[in-house]
Image (tube, rainbow, N blue to C red):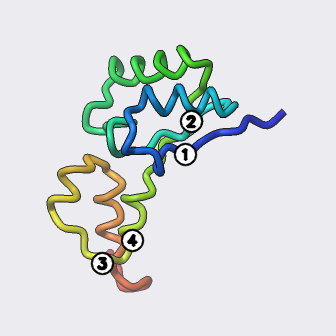
Amino acid sequence: MRPVTLCTLQWTDLDIEEVCRKARGFGYDGLELACCGNHLEVDKADDAYCNKRKELLKKYGLKLFAAATHLASQCVCDNIDELLTKRSGLSVVMAFQHSRQPLGTEKG
């Protein structure tokens, strides 16, 4: 049977433990953790941090299925200010900064 998961992006006003508690109560099998709020802080995501997140989900019988980087990926073709880059800590942000050129105009 296919697992049913919840993307936490719409729940970042709540602490991650509260989201886990609610998701389990709603019957979800796992989460797609948002890379914002305190759900998945990419700049802190070393092995110890990630293990703590996995243990928290396990405490509520949930599994981690994906990391939601929606906010960073919405920046495609937009100017991305330095503050956003510093706050997100996502390498994907830097990759999208370079994708603003029209196709075929890349420097080789």
Q: Secondary structure at mark 4?
A: loop
Q: Amino acid at mark 1?
A: Cys
Q: Say whether disc 3 or disc 2 marks the residue closer to the N-terminus.
A: 2
On the rendered structure, is 28 left or right of 14? Answer: right
- The residue wearing badge 2 is 31
* Residue 89, horizontal then vertical, whole percent: 25, 46
Q: Determine contact: label 4, label 3, CB under 8 Å.
A: no
Cα–Cα gap, marks 4 and 3? 19 Å
Q: Say whether disc 1 or disc 3 marks the residue closer to the N-terminus.
A: 1
Residue 83 higher or lower than 12, as above or below: below
Cα–Cα gap, marks 3 and 2? 40 Å
| Callout 4 crowding tier (Cα within 10 Å): few <14, some 14–19, many ≥20 | some
User: On the image, which quarter does residue 34 sit in?
Assistant: top left
* Residue 64, horizontal then vertical, whole percent: 55, 30
- The residue wearing badge 1 is 7
| Callout 1 crowding tier (Cα within 10 Å): few <14, some 14–19, many ≥20 | some
Q: Amino acid at mark 2?
A: Leu
Q: Say whether disc 1 or disc 2 marks the residue closer to the N-terminus.
A: 1
Q: Determine contact: label 1, label 2, CB under 8 Å.
A: yes
Viewer-side label of 1, 3: 1
User: On the image, which quarter does residue 104 sit in?
Assistant: bottom left
Front residue of this view, candidates 85 and 16: 16
- The residue wearing badge 4 is 76
Cα–Cα gap, marks 1 and 2? 6 Å
Q: Mark on residue 107? A: 3
